[in-house]
Amino acid sequence: MCLSLKPSSSHAAGKAHCSRCEALCCRLMVVLQPEEKIPVHLTTRLDNGLHVMARDDAGWCVAVDGMHMRCGIYESRPQVCRRFVMNGPYCRFVRAESSEPP
């Protein structure tokens, strides 16, 4: 997963690459499956009962190691994170959606 914080000129234009990605994927809600073994201090339950990865005040997944800008639980990351492919269809969709005016 791409985790550099260097701003890009356009989310939608060109291919995603770690040297210019804003790590939008690390700010998405990650719904956990019952069989996933994520440390409890990295998760939370929403009011509707969904078990999700916790996020910090800025919206970042708490598993992101801010010092090194990478996933701190990469080897045991949730399945949804494993399926999120850099520059794949969903990555491109999220990047394009974030570049649209509010």
Image (tube, grey):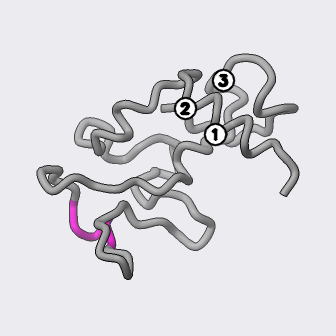
Report the mark closest to the observer, 3 or 2.
Answer: 2
Residue at coordinates 59% horizontally, 22% vertically from top-left? Answer: 87
- The residue that disc 2 covers is 90
Residue 44 x %, y %: 33, 72
Which amino acid type is marked by label 2?
Tyr
N-terminal of the pair, mark 3 or mark 2, is 3
Report the mark closest to the observer, 1 or 3.
Answer: 1
Task: Please give the range of residues in magenta.
Answer: 39-44
Q: Seen from this angle, which residue lies furthest left?
A: 35
Which amino acid type is marked by label 1?
Val
Q: Secondary structure at mark 3?
A: loop
- The residue that disc 3 covers is 16
Q: Secondary structure at mark 2?
A: helix
Spatial separation of the CA atoms under disc 3 and disc 2: 12 Å
Q: Please tell me the numbered disc located at residue 94.
A: 1
Q: Quadrant of the C terminus?
A: bottom right
Q: Is residue 17 above or below residue 27?
A: above
Residue at coordinates 34% horizontally, 63% vertically from top-left? Answer: 52
CA neighbours of label 2 inside 10 A, class few (<14), some (14 to 19), many (20+): some
N-terminal of the pair, mark 1 or mark 3, is 3
Q: Secondary structure at mark 1?
A: helix
Spatial separation of the CA atoms under disc 1 and disc 2: 6 Å
Spatial separation of the CA atoms under disc 1 and disc 3: 11 Å
